[in-house]
Every structure is written in C-alpha cells, then in structure tokens.
C-alpha cells in the first residue's frame, strides 16, 4: 500500500509506529513499567525498562520514563492518598492495575512536576486511559479525578471555562 494511502497510526495504539513525541512515548513506557510494578506488589529494587520496550522510541523517552517511574514509586503513598480523596465510592486498591498506573502517573505529573501544565498531564492521562484503560468509562474517571486534583493543588493554572456570553 503506498504511504499516502496508509491510515495514520495513533501515537499510543499498541503495536503502532513509535510516537514522534518523546514525552508521550515515555509515558507509555512508564505506564507499562508501573503496571508491572503494581502486579509485583510494589517490589523494592531497580525496575529497569527492558531494552526491547525502548527500541524504536524517540531519543530520551526511556530516560524520561525511568524518571517518571522512579518518582511515582517514591511518592506512591501520597499519590494514592490524593487519588483516594478524589474517588467517589471507590479506593485506589479496588481499581484495575492499569487504571491505578494511569492515575498515579497523571497525579505524579500534577503534584510533583511543576514544569508540566496540569491540562497536559490530564489530557495525556486521558489518552492513555482511552487506549489502555480497563473499560470504556476509565477515561472519564481519570479526567474527573485528575481535574479535581489539579483544581485543589494548582488552582491558578486550572481555570474553569467561562460560559458563552449571550449574543
């Protein structure tokens, strides 16, 4: 099939071509590592990213993924507490492992990475949830929880949209 007729590959679809954005690729790698770490019951010690996972990803994405994973692991307890406070009728421990990993990653970026605008962290987490979440409602859950977290912790950066003015 000629290149011009190829459908565009989503940058997050499993098995799709490597995303051009190293930050997005890093988030996918970090999500995979955090998912495994969660299934290993938060095992201590190094959690290296296998070389084959980083193969074909943009330069710098494996390093950023390692930073994200290290940060989430170091802050798991406060991240889980922050997420728990914003979940309605649920707790972090009751969520699917993929959903926990997505929420922890998004919450980490909102709470501990001031250089990342909250809306970017939320949007990226929602995109991960659409592709990797446990069900069709995961994206809405992730959006709601992280939006509340951002409004509580970085209110000047998260403004409510103004209602449209009457014509």
Image (cartoon, grey):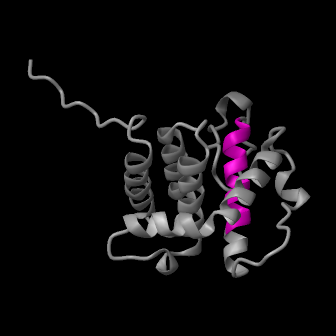
Indicate the quadrant containing the C terminus: top left, top right, bottom left or bottom right. Answer: top left
Left or right: 48, with 124 as reference point = right
Residue shown at 55%/63% (left/top)? 79
Tell me if residue 99 can be seen.
no
> How far from the left and from the top, in percent, is residue 131?
56, 57
> How far from the left and from the top, in percent, is residue 147?
40, 50
Total marks shown come to 0
Q: Residue reaching furthest left?
A: 167
* Vertical arrangement, residue 2 with respect to residue 24, above or below: above
Q: Main secondary structure of the magenta part?
A: helix
Tell me if residue 61 can be seen.
yes
Look at the image and say whether residue 80 sits in the magenta stretch: no
> How far from the left and from the top, in percent, is residue 2?
74, 31
Q: Which residues are magenta?
A: 21-34
Indicate the quadrant containing the N terminus: top left, top right, bottom left or bottom right. Answer: top right
State the image quarter where residue 39 is shown.
bottom right
Residue shown at 76%/51% (left/top)? 67
Left or right: 33, with 141 as reference point = right
């Amino acid at each position: 099939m000629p290149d011009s007729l190829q459908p565009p590959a989503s940058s997050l679809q499993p098995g799709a071509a490597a995303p051009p954005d190293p930050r997005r690729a890093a988030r996918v790698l970090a999500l995979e590592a955090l998912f495994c770490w969660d299934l290993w019951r938060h095992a201590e010690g190094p959690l290296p990213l296998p070389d084959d996972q980083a193969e074909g990803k943009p330069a710098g994405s494996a390093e950023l993924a390692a930073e994200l994973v290290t940060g989430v692991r170091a802050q798991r307890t406060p991240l889980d507490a922050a997420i728990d406070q914003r979940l309605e009728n649920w707790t972090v421990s009751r969520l699917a492992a993929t959903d926990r990993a997505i929420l922890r990653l998004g919450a980490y970026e909102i709470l501990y990475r001031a250089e990342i605008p909250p809306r970017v962290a939320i949007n990226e987490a929602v995109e991960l949830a659409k592709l990797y979440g446990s069900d069709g409602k995961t994206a809405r859950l992730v959006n709601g929880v992280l939006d509340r977290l951002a409004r509580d912790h970085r209110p000047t950066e998260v403004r409510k949209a103004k209602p449209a003015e009457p014509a």
